[in-house]
Image: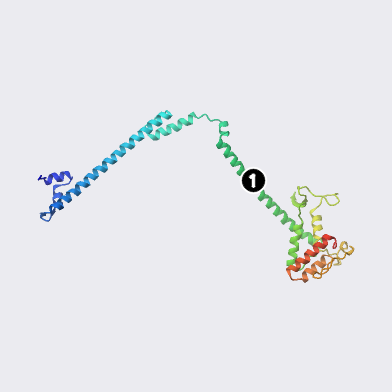
Amino acid sequence: MIEVSTEFLADVLETSPGELTQALKDGENFKPQADIEAIIKSQFGEKLLAAKLSGKKEGKSWGEKETLTAKEKALKAKFGVEGTNLDEIIEAAVDAAKKNTQLNPDDVKNSEVFISETKRLKALLKEKEDEIASKVSSFEKAETMRTAKEYGLRLLKEKNFVLPENEDIKETMLTTLFEKLESDQTKLARIDGKIAVVDAHGRIKENETGTRELTFDDHFVSVSKKFFPQAVADNRQSPANKNQPEKTPPSNPDIPEMKDANDLIKALNAERDPAKQRAIKEHFDKQVKDGIIT
């Protein structure tokens, strides 16, 4: 059997003889042979593992360094630049590329990227311009109609039009009246701060005789006469309506006979059923259209 001193084992395991002896003893006596061998194997295994790991790290570091050196040489040769490390070489290569560029304005304008991006930006600009134009148009139309309603209500009062007493009926008829101010060939527009009557192309319309332009006042009063009667000084119907020859309307037992707008208002005020009110109004409008009521 080969005998090994405690001092030798302590030196191999990189510990002191005292610490090793204390680890191998149990009190005053040494531990069993099997336990001593297990302790020595364990400590020796730990030292061996540490040595292997250290060797791997050193080898990896050396390999990475060699790889970087090869890349640095390749970059230097490719771009014809110098540098002591990879960062310096890359920076030198970028600077060299900037100095050696041969691009001119025509090259840029004819490039696929420039053409594609220009088309995209033009389309985006057109979309935004259309969106803005639509919003401006909607705002101007709303403002025009708001002004027309305010001025129209004053005209109804100034021209002595008689409106229904029932608020719901009055609002319904006013809403319809303002809707009828415009059609496919007749529009309202603000020109020089005033409400003007124009055609579908934006040209100011003329009156029926073609002798002068059609003013908003004349247009509004003409349309209003189809909805409301006008009162005269003695509270009678205006002569223009009174002297018209009577025409016989078609009989309808569910709808009262109406000869003018006054009869329409009376009929609407007397009827409480919304559906029947609409039927009365539709019947009246048809008679006006057919020339039975003027």
Name the residue nearer the viewer: 156 or 208: 208
Q: Position of residue 201 (x, y in %)?
A: 76, 47
Q: Residue at x 81, y 55 (%)?
A: 218
Q: Can you say which quadrant of the picture contains the N terminus? A: top left
Quadrant in the picture for the C terminus: bottom right
Q: Is residue 223 visible?
A: yes
Q: Is residue 193 left or right of residue 289?
A: left
Residue under numbered circle 1 = 129
35 relative to 255, above or below? above
State the scheme by which the image is colored: rainbow
How dense is the environment of label 1, judged by Cα within 10 Å: few (below 14), some, or many (20 and up)?
Answer: few
Spot occupied by residue 71 in the image (x, y as percentages of width and height): 38, 33
- Residue 159, by quadrant, is bottom right
Q: In this rendered view, identify the residue nearer to me: 137 or 22.
A: 22
- Mark 1 falls on what kind of element? helix
Q: Label 1 is placed on what type of residue?
A: Glu
Q: Residue at the location (29% across, 41% down)?
A: 57
Q: Position of residue 35 (x, y in %)?
A: 15, 53
How many numbered marks, from 0 up?
Answer: 1
Q: Nearer the viewer, residue 259 or 132?
A: 259
What x and y, as percent, mark residue 206? Answer: 82, 50
> In screen coordinates, is 114 left or right of 192?
left
- The reply to whether residue 81 is in sight is no
- Residue at screen point 56% across, 37% down: 114
- Residue 83 in the figure: left or right of residue 219: left
